[in-house]
Image (tube, rainbow, N blue to C red):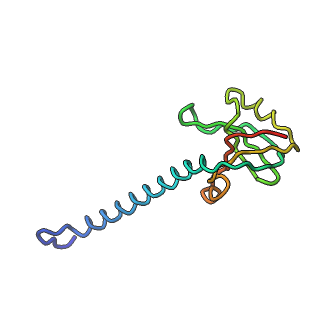
Amino acid sequence: MGEVRPGRAPAWWTWARRVTLTVGGAVLLGGAVVLTSLGLDRVDVQPVTCQVTSATPHRNGAGKVTGSSGVLVDTRECGRIEVTGGIDHSDLDAAARSFVVGKRYVFDRGLTSRTWGKYLNMIPTARSFHGF
């Protein structure tokens, strides 16, 4: 182990402290990025028009508090979008069947869903939608 001088911490203690601070800082930074991206997805909501190719119910998580549900809609122009707003979550199968394949819909997506969410491996989220 080596000799410890009075008033000085052992080398392993200094190393463990640095690792703890580094890991803690990385966790805090990651949490800040996730919370910021979720918040920014509610800002600067803009409509995007896309043609639907398929729609399937999507359930994620176990309960009402931790889980989320919506309809995963695959589109030609916009890729995959999870529609959470304007959906009756008690019957997701009926909500998924309400999308007509080949029809164009306007999806309202926030800033993160339109821009850098793809780099965080996020499925873009639509807060609301309507067909025309």
Quadrant in the picture for the N terminus:
bottom left
**Foreground residue, 67 or 87?**
87
Q: Where is residue 65 in the image (x, y as percent from the top left)?
A: 53, 33
User: Residue visible at 56% across and 52% down?
Assistant: 37
Image quadrant in which you'd find residue 25: bottom left
Which residue is drawn at the image coordinates 73% and 48% (left, top)?
Answer: 47
Furthest residue to the left? 6
From the top left corner, tell me how far across and down residue 62 is, in percent: 58, 34
Q: Measured along the vertical axis of the image, is residue 56 above or below residue 112?
A: above
Q: Nearer the viewer, residue 77 or 25?
A: 77
Q: Quadrant of residue 84?
A: top right
- Total marks shown come to 0
Where is residue 75 drawn, in percent x and y? Answer: 80, 49
Q: Is residue 33 left or right of residue 95?
A: left
Q: Is residue 9 left or right of residue 125?
A: left
Residue sticking out furthest to the right: 102
Is residue 53 depicted above or below 3 in this figure? above
Q: Which residue is at a point 76% across and 32% down the rendered structure image?
A: 95
Q: Quadrant of residue 101?
A: top right
Q: Is residue 3 left or right of residue 131?
A: left
Looking at the image, residue 35 lies above or below residue 128 = below
In the rendered image, the quadrant that contains the C terminus is top right
Question: Seen from this angle, which residue lies furthest top?
Answer: 90
